[in-house]
Amino acid sequence: MEFASTVLFSGTDDSWPSGGAQEFFVLGTPSDIAWAAESWGCLRILLLVVFGAAGTLARYGLQGLVQEHTGMGFPTGTLSVNLAGCFLFGAVAQLGLSRAALPPDWRIALTVGFLGAFTTFSTFGYETLRMLEEAEWLRATEYVGASLLGGLLLMSAGAWLADKL
């Protein structure tokens, strides 16, 4: 879980406390699951489902729109989604962790739910692999470089902008 293990931002992340709602997603005993449901209710799970669906739809729409306007020669739709996701993740994480401006349930809904469904790392990997298989070394290098460097720069820009708010 990328958000729970981040070390780029100061502060503590309480999105994955031991014995919490994550028991719904791992093999736990029925008493573990019952304890998590009673302790946390279903708010986080509901927020994850709703924001995950919204992130999926946003990804589908933005990726298709960008790709339609740029053509099929380069995966600009995926690149655009990943870079936008990095910017938004940087801003949300900075607001949520450094300034405690977002309650944990909403921070998790935005990062794990919306942005987790919005960003497209597996698609990025597949598209890069296809370019390499087709011996398109320069295009693959450009794509990986733009994704990684652009992602890091936009993650920093999002965090910087959140500090200015």
Image (cartoon, helix red, strand yellow):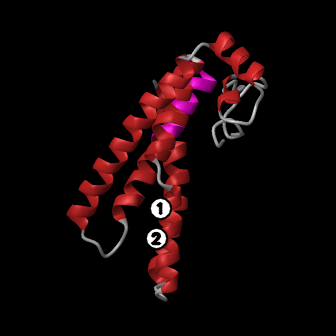
Residue 28 image point, x, y percent: 76, 30
Q: Are marks 2 and 1 in contact (CB under 8 Å)?
A: yes
Residue 29 image point, x, y percent: 78, 27
Task: Please give the name of the residue rendered at 39% of the width and 43% of the height, measured from the top-left corner.
Answer: 56
Task: Please give the name of the residue rendered at 55% of the width and 25% of the height, measured from the top-left corner.
Answer: 45
Residue 100 as seen in the image, left or right of residue 127: right
> Which residue does the numbered mark 1 point to in the structure image?
123
> Which residue does the numbered mark 2 point to in the structure image?
127
Which segment is the magenta one? 88-102
- Whether residue 115 is visible, yes or no, is yes
Circle 2 Cα neighbour tier, 10 Å, few/some/many (<14 / 14–19 / ≥20):
some
Mark 1 residue element: helix
Numbered mark located on residue 161 in the image: none
Quarter of the picture holding the N terminus: top right
Task: Please give the name of the residue rendered at 62% of the width and 25% of the height, measured from the top-left corner.
Answer: 97
The type of residue carrying mark 1 is Thr
- Please, is residue 37 above or below residue 144 in the view? above
Q: Is residue 95 magenta?
A: yes
How many numbered marks, from 0 up? 2
- Please, is residue 135 above or below residue 17 in the view? below
